[in-house]
Structure formats: structure tokens, C-alpha cells
Amino acid sequence: MQKPRIAVIISSTRDTRFADKPAAWLMDKVKGHADLDFELLDLRDQDLPFFNEKASNRFAPSEDPRVVAWQQKLEGFDGFVFLVAEYNHSITGALKNALDQAYVEWNRKPMAAVGYGGVGAARAVEHLRQIAVELQLVPLNSAVHIGGGDFMKVSPMGEDAPMGAIEDHLQGSLDALLEDLTWWAKATKTAREA
């Protein structure tokens, strides 16, 4: 079996977002992973309109070529890791819109999260898991949460230290996330291809 392909989706599109720092750290940690191939997908780079289709592509084919291009991009992946910012106890509007633009392409694939913010985006990650269930994604229990003192250590709002300064606090969670993601990506890929 070919190695499962995992998209790492940056969910914040703000000019002053923090996401680039943990995204670079994560991509460095997963580079050369023995069982999974990772690719970074930045929602800033996707030309997605606000959802305006007749229905979800679960019920009717999408018509906007930008939406179809997004769906085709997602179709090539076997799982997802979302870099989650928490805005008002939830995910970003850009992420919600990107999730709504597809349905079939999310189905029966695992999703994990790396969250950041005051409480490590715990509330946003929990909300994302609820949305994932409706999209027939397989939300993983394991996640990486960069919160509290760790967030202030590496955030520009705090010390702006490199991610390595808190890596020892994150490594166990990342190891668990990658172990679960590997198992579920292989299992769901095998089932989808059967």
C-alpha cells in the first residue's frame, strides 16, 4: 500500500496569525515520517468563496470551479491535521467555510488537531470534532494543545521564543497523535480502497 497522504491545514488566514510558527514546527517534526506523507495546505492560498452552492456535494454536484478545485485537492488526501486557532470558543470562519465546501471528500478519513491559544484551542478543537462527525471524518482523541504558559512562551504576545523552548511539553502529545493518525489513516485507506 502506498503511504497515506495527510494534509496539514492552516485554518487561520489573518495577516498577524500565529499559525505559521507551529506549522513550521509540525512540518519539521513529520518530515520523513516512516508511514505517512505530509503536505501543508494553507487556507490563505485557497480561492474559496463563501459557501453558495445549491446544496452540499453530498446531495448535488458543486458548480463553482473554485469549490470543485478545492474538492479535488481534498480527494487526494487520506487524512488531515488541522492547525486550529480558537476564536470566540470556536474554529475560524475560514475553516468552517472550507469544511462546508466539501462533504464526500472528507468522508471516512481521520482528522487530528494541533490547537493553540490561551486554553490550547481546546474548545475550538472540541467544536471541530463535532463538525467532523457530521462530515463523516474520523476525529481522533489525541491532539496537541499549545496553551497557557507554553503559548505565552512562544507567542509574539509573550516571549516569542522558538517552538523548541516548549517542545518537551508537546512531544508526548505529538507522538500519540501520530501513532493514532497512522493507524486510522492506514485502516480507513484500506477500507476505502477495498
Image (cartoon, rainbow, N blue to C red):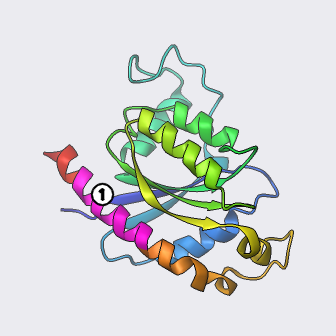
Membership of 105 in magenta stretch: no
Towards the viewer: 68 or 88: 88
The answer to whether 58 appears left or right of 159 in the picture is: left
Is 104 on the left or on the right of 100, as rendered? left
> Residue 155's x, y, as percent?
79, 71
Q: Quadrant of residue 15?
A: bottom right
Residue located 46% across and 22% down the image: 56
Q: Position of residue 128 (x, y in %)?
A: 55, 44
Magenta region:
176-188
Residue 60 in the image: above or below residue 179 = above
**Residue designated by label 1:** 184
Amino acid type indicated by mark 1: Trp
Q: Nearer the viewer, residue 23 or 170?
A: 170
Q: Main secondary structure of the magenta part?
A: helix
Q: Is residue 187 magenta?
A: yes
Residue under the point 50% across and 39% down: 130
Q: Quadrant of the C terminus?
A: top left
Nearer to the camera, 194 or 151: 151
Q: Residue at x 45, y 36 (%)?
A: 71
| Front one among 41 and 134 | 134
Indicate the quadrant where residue 84 lies: bottom right
Horizontal side of 165 relative to 78 (left or right) equals: right
Residue 112, position as x, y percentages in the image: 47, 57
In the displayed orientation, state which residue is furthest to the left: 194
Relative height, residue 71 to residue 191 (above, below): above
Q: Quadrant of the N terminus?
A: bottom left
Residue in view at x 56 percent, y 48 percent: 126
Give the total number of marks visible in the rendering. 1
Q: Residues within 10 Å of mark 1 (few under 14, many from 20)?
A: many
- Location of residue 81 in the rendering, given as x and y in whole percent from the top left corner: 49, 57
Secondary structure type for disc 1: helix
Position of 14 relative to 132 (above/below): below
